[in-house]
């Protein structure tokens, strides 16, 4: 994969050899075993230097010291020669134009020529008001402000944005345009007129530094690996959501992105899960050293005693899982006329309680199979049972877990409640 941008090891970098700035940068890269063959030395230019002023974890202002003149003829030739040399070895090309004079017309035309020859995808982060210079790119990734600056169209709503994008397609003749939209996420426009709006994945925003680089880097990685543009954009959006939650110029690790994807997938499942889905949740929770608490029951009519019991059960650990008897097993356990509510109704009521994290429905008369599968750290029942009577106790204690008995509220039970209702109705 070839990343052609000004903040990577494959950077075409301006250097002022009257100072030791570039030399020290090269030494640092070499100490990190990063290939610096693509760093072009130009004695006529200073190295771009950016100073960010941060207060209370928020960037207030940025002060740049730079030279934005186009490359000299000699430096331009070195850039083109290096790109020509490495393109056959790359999966694709990411060209981040920082508008610092590096991506000249000649440089970009050379990239397009060599990319077409070797059938490599080109993705561009554009700058400036003339996007026609990026003709030949497969995808461009401007932000909303850059779209405004490149179009003679006043953009006030989504209809105007569609017209602006159509105008840009006419300039670049590319396959897709991915527009980053800050707090509104991003929008992917494809040449077949398909538009996909992707809401932001950011949970907390501390610093937007590097968010655009993260988007194009992850989008490119995914697209070069064979994902379609929509899948690639969704992955890039997740990565951006992670990086803006960090202060300063940061990276997103494979582990962070993997965890973010898992969390999102699990959240989308809801909290009424099949046993398979529940095991996915439990495994992820265990990887993060979360304590799993399990209890079970019919929960036919939820009353105050149930709520107090579940609250105390939740207090014993991090995640409370409730095993819920299905309708057939409740009928066998409780007799004719039960359950009063269907299993889906009972599950939905339990899912609305803030103390309950996940519910899974089982059909056996006892939760023994469930306990064997999920192996909770703590098995909880009411103290109307003795420890010896708790189903699954031997399993839990066998692998080092424990059983807890919680005092139940006296005078509160579903059977007692139903008896009172019947008596009042009969009276």
Image (spheres, rainbow, N blue to C red):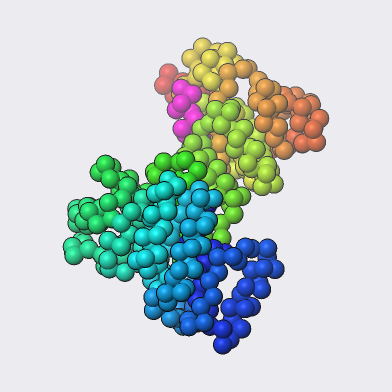
Looking at the image, can residue 157 be seen? no
Query: Picture quarter containing residue 215?
Result: bottom left
At 54% across and 63% down in the image, what residue appears? 10
Looking at the image, can residue 12 be seen? yes
At 68% across and 42% down in the image, what residue appears? 286
Above/below status of 322 relative to 42: above
**Total marks drawn?**
0
Secondary structure mainly formed by the magenta segment: helix
Above/below status of 8 relative to 257: below
Q: Position of residue 342 (x, y in %)?
A: 46, 22
Q: Which residues are magenta?
A: 342-353
Left or right: 402, with 173 as reference point: right
Name the one closer to the observer, 88 or 362.
Answer: 88
Q: Is residue 348 magenta?
A: yes
Q: Position of residue 299 (x, y in %)?
A: 54, 28
Query: Picture quarter containing residue 290?
Result: top right
Q: Position of residue 247 (x, y in %)?
A: 54, 68
């Amino acid at each position: 994969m070839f990343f052609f941008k000004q903040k990577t090891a494959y950077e075409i970098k301006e250097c002022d050899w009257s100072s030791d700035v570039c030399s020290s940068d090269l030494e640092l890269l070499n100490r990190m075993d990063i290939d610096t063959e693509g760093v072009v030395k130009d004695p006529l230019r200073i190295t771009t230097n950016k100073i960010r002023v941060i207060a209370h974890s928020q960037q207030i202002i940025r002060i740049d010291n730079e030279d934005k003149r186009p490359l000299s003829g000699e430096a331009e030739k070195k850039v083109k020669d290096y790109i020509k040399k490495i393109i056959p070895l790359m999966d694709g090309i990411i060209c981040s134009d920082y508008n610092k004079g590096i991506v000249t017309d000649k440089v970009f035309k050379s990239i397009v020529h060599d990319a077409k020859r070797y059938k490599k995808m080109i993705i561009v982060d554009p700058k400036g008001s003339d996007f026609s210079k990026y003709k030949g790119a497969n995808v461009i990734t401007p932000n909303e402000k850059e779209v405004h600056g490149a179009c003679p169209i006043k953009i006030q709503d989504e209809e105007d944005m569609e017209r602006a994008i159509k105008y840009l397609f006419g300039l670049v003749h590319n396959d897709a345009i991915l527009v980053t939209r800050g707090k509104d996420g991003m929008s992917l426009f494809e040449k077949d007129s398909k538009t996909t709006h992707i809401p932001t994945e950011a949970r907390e925003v501390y610093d937007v530094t590097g968010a655009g680089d993260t988007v194009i880097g992850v989008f490119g990685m995914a697209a070069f690996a064979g994902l379609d543009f929509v899948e690639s954009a969704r992955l890039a959006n997740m990565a951006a959501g992670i990086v803006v939650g960090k202060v300063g110029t940061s990276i997103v690790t494979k582990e962070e992105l993997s965890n973010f994807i898992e969390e999102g997938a699990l959240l989308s499942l809801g909290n009424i899960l099949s046993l398979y889905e529940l095991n996915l949740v439990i495994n992820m929770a265990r990887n993060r050293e979360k304590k799993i608490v399990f209890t079970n029951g019919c929960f036919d009519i939820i009353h105050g005693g149930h709520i107090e019991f579940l609250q105390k059960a939740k207090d014993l650990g991090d995640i409370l899982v409730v095993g819920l008897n299905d309708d057939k097993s409740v009928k066998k356990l409780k007799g004719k006329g039960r359950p009063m509510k269907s299993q889906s109704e009972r599950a939905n009521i339990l899912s609305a309680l803030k103390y309950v994290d996940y519910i899974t429905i089982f059909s056996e008369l006892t939760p023994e199979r469930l306990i064997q599968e999920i192996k909770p750290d703590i098995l909880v029942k009411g103290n109307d049972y003795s420890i010896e009577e708790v189903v699954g106790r031997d399993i839990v204690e066998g692998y080092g877990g424990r059983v807890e008995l919680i005092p139940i509220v006296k005078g509160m039970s579903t059977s007692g409640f139903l008896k009172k209702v019947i008596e009042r109705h009969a009276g």
